[in-house]
Image (cartoon, rainbow, N blue to C red):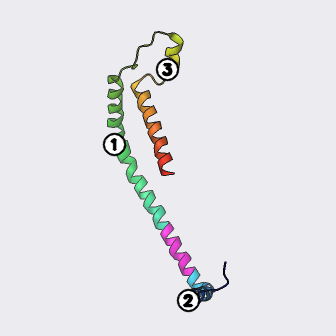
Amino acid sequence: MTDERDPGLQALFDSATTIAEDDDFVSRVMADIDNSRRRTVLGWAIAGLLLVPVTWWMAGPVLETLSVVGELLPDSLFTIEEGLVADLLAPVNSAMGAAGLFFVGAWTLYRKITS
């Protein structure tokens, strides 16, 4: 480390202490932050209220589509004669189980790549 200081940077720090002592400046900044926070909360509340009827309107067709897809999919992917093995593999021996495992694997891979 060095004890040398940049004069321009030191001037910025020196001027910042005089601005921070100005109570009017701080109160205006805090008032702007409070106004921004109120607008954000109001915007999210309005968006939520508008999405409730849209969600309610879309729930019927989405549930009907999922019901039809569930009826079309086979009960099991592979026929297993052994009782214990069939019981153990039952959660993943379906199209939905395989899709679930795929999405869990894809999510895990995504998390490993992005972290």
Within-10-Å neighbours for mark 3: few <14, some 14–19, many 20+ = some
**Residue range highlighted in magenta:** 27-37
Q: Are marks 1 and 3 in contact (CB under 8 Å)?
A: no
Q: Residue at (39%, 26%) from the top-left corner?
A: 95
Which residue is denoted by mark 2 in the rendering?
A: 8
The kind of secondary structure element at disc 3 is helix
Q: Of helix, strand and loop, which mostly describes the magenta segment?
A: helix
Q: Residue at (49%, 67%) from the top-left corner?
A: 38
Which residue is denoted by mark 1 in the rendering?
A: 57
Q: Which mark is residue 89?
A: 3
The kind of secondary structure element at disc 2 is helix
Question: Real-space Cα distance between discs 3 and 2?
Answer: 70 Å
Q: Nearer the viewer, mark 3 or mark 2?
A: 2
Q: Position of residue 58 (x, y in %)?
A: 34, 41
Q: Residue at (32%, 36%) from the top-left corner?
A: 61
Between discs 1 and 3, the one toward the N terminus: 1
Q: Nearer the viewer, mark 1 or mark 2?
A: 2
Q: Nearer the viewer, residue 14 or 60?
A: 14
Q: Nearer the viewer, residue 35 or 79?
A: 79
Q: Is residue 104 left or right of residue 12?
A: left
The residue type indicated by label 3 comes to Leu
Measured along the vertical axis of the image, is residue 48 above or below residue 81? below
Between discs 1 and 2, the one toward the N terminus: 2
The kind of secondary structure element at disc 1 is helix
